[in-house]
Amino acid sequence: MSVSAVDIVIPCFKPNLHLLTRCLQKLEEHTDVPHSILVVGDGFIPEDAVVLRKLLAELTNPHQLVHSHVVTFPQPVYLQRCVTHALSFLSPEAQIAVFLPPNLHLVDPAWFGKVQEPLMKDGLAAAVFFGCEQYDYSVEPARVEHAPNFFPAVAVSRRFLSEANLSAGEWGDLPMKIASSAAVIGCTCWAVQSVSCESYTAVAYAPPRPASAYPGKKVGITAGTDPRHDR
């Protein structure tokens, strides 16, 4: 039986469920190594979990998909808890964990090799950022001191995960937090701009703010749209 080379974690807010079908289809079409997929449904009721499992069961690359798992939260718990909760479901044999937003659809059949290369060549590499809309096949992987803008997906070495700061409220914060925690322990981060992808607008929800932030106003959940910040 194949062992997973990479665990792919896709946290998804309920309003973005419609983006998952194409995300999963493109992922399966263009992932050429054994892998596992974990979908974390934030604000998903049990019926939504049935839809997710059906999507996973219909994937067209069953020989490379070693395992799939669905975790759902009926009430929104937001990105940080989705990501940290997913860690307990990672495959023990996979040495890389990829965190992928559902509105980013990979269309590059060589995406994993490109992302894996810096992690294999650099013994201090902690993470690789990718998924830039302005991808360029001619650009070589580059070491970065800070998380580059608009690289929403991140591949993290499993040996670094226990040290990584994953306390991000939105997708835009996650690469920044990971890069900062890597620098603290003397690890490196890389950016790979040559991975081709498609990005779609997604609904982004921010966690509720404390009442002090809204003097005299009722506190609620704010919503907006941004193709780079979805959950």
Image: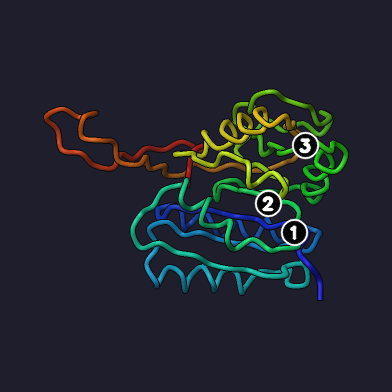
Provide residue 100's location: percent of width, then percent of height.
60, 48
Name the mark on residue 94. 1
Up/down of 65 relative to 222, above or below: below
Q: Name the outermost residue toward the left.
A: 216
**Which structural element holds mark 1?**
loop
Q: Label 1 is placed on what type of residue? A: Ala
Callout 2: 10 Å neighbours few (<14), some, many (20+)? many
Q: Earlier in the sequence, mark 3 or mark 1?
A: 1
Q: Quadrant of residue 74?
A: bottom left
Instruction: Judge by depth and name the residue closer to the eye, 165 or 30.
Output: 165
Which residue in the structure is indicated by mark 3?
A: 125
Name the mark on residue 196. none
**Which structural element holds mark 3?**
strand
Instruction: Judge by depth and name the residue closer to the eye, 199 or 172.
Output: 172
Is disc 3 in contact with disc 1, using a CB cutoff of under 8 Å?
no
Which residue in the structure is indicated by mark 2?
A: 97
- Using the numbered discs, state the Cα–Cα distance from disc 3 to disc 2 in whole angstroms: 13 Å
- Using the numbered discs, state the Cα–Cα distance from disc 3 to disc 1 in whole angstroms: 16 Å
